Image (spheres, grey):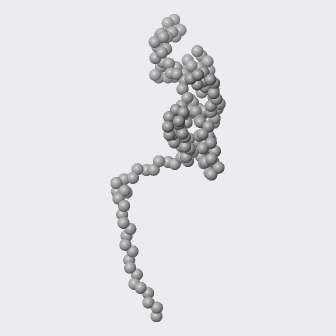
Amino acid sequence: MNEILESNEMTQQECRLMDIDYIQPKVEGGNKMATLKEEAQAYVPPQTKNIAEIQKISVDLDLKDGDGKDKDGIVYKYKYTLINGEKYRVAGSILGGIKNLLKLNPNLQFVQVLVEGQGMNTRYQVIPYTDPAAPITTQEAIVQPPAAQPQQPPVTPQ
């Protein structure tokens, strides 16, 4: 129960104490005792998010190797990064997309991942990150015709 968590080197108990949503178990004789109901309410299953959930991704993030099990219990390996103590999986196709962008622009610092589809049919497209454009006001949206150029009198040779 007090095993060291990889994300921030804290025990589960220490993490629970810092979690404001965790329901504190009963205290009896100085030892904390929780009911099954309290533990169930406080339980958050371990979850790995997807790097595509992040809008602006630095290409300098550290990657780690992770192991998971599919629904049939078969172990598979994956790459992930830790951001604010949470694991974000990085698919191989995303790594390939970043590699291609770095060939074109070795100074690239940030990328964005576009996602299409779901489950096994998910496709990722990696693009260079660009800051979102400022909203256009109504006044700016009105296109003004170019001002008429003044007519020059024709030049006659003398």
Residue 55 drawn above or below residue 30: below
Q: Residue furthest bottom?
A: 158
Q: Is residue 28 visible?
A: yes
Where residue 45 sits: x, y (%)? Answer: 52, 22
Q: How many marks?
A: 0
Q: Is residue 49 above or below residue 97?
A: above
Image-quadrant location for residue 97: top right
Residue 133: image location, x then y, percent = 45, 50
Taking the image as shown, residue 118 lies to the left or right of residue 141, namely: right
Taking the spot 52% from the left edge, 32% from the top edge, the residue there is: 119
- Residue at 34%, 57% (x, y): give it: 139
Percent x, y of residue 110? 57, 45
Q: Using the rendered view, name the quadrant where residue 9 is placed.
A: top right
Classify residue 151 as left or right of residue 70: left
* Image x and y of residue 109, in percent: 59, 46
Residue 148 vs residue 100, the one in the foreground: 100
Image height of 25 relative to 68, above or below:
above
The answer to whether any part of residue 5 appears in the image is no
Tell me which residue sits at (55%, 46%) in the image.
127
Quadrant in which the N terminus appears = top right
Residue appearing at x 62%, y 51% in the figure: 105
Tell which residue pokes out farthest to the top in this image: 29
Front position in the image: 32 or 98? 98
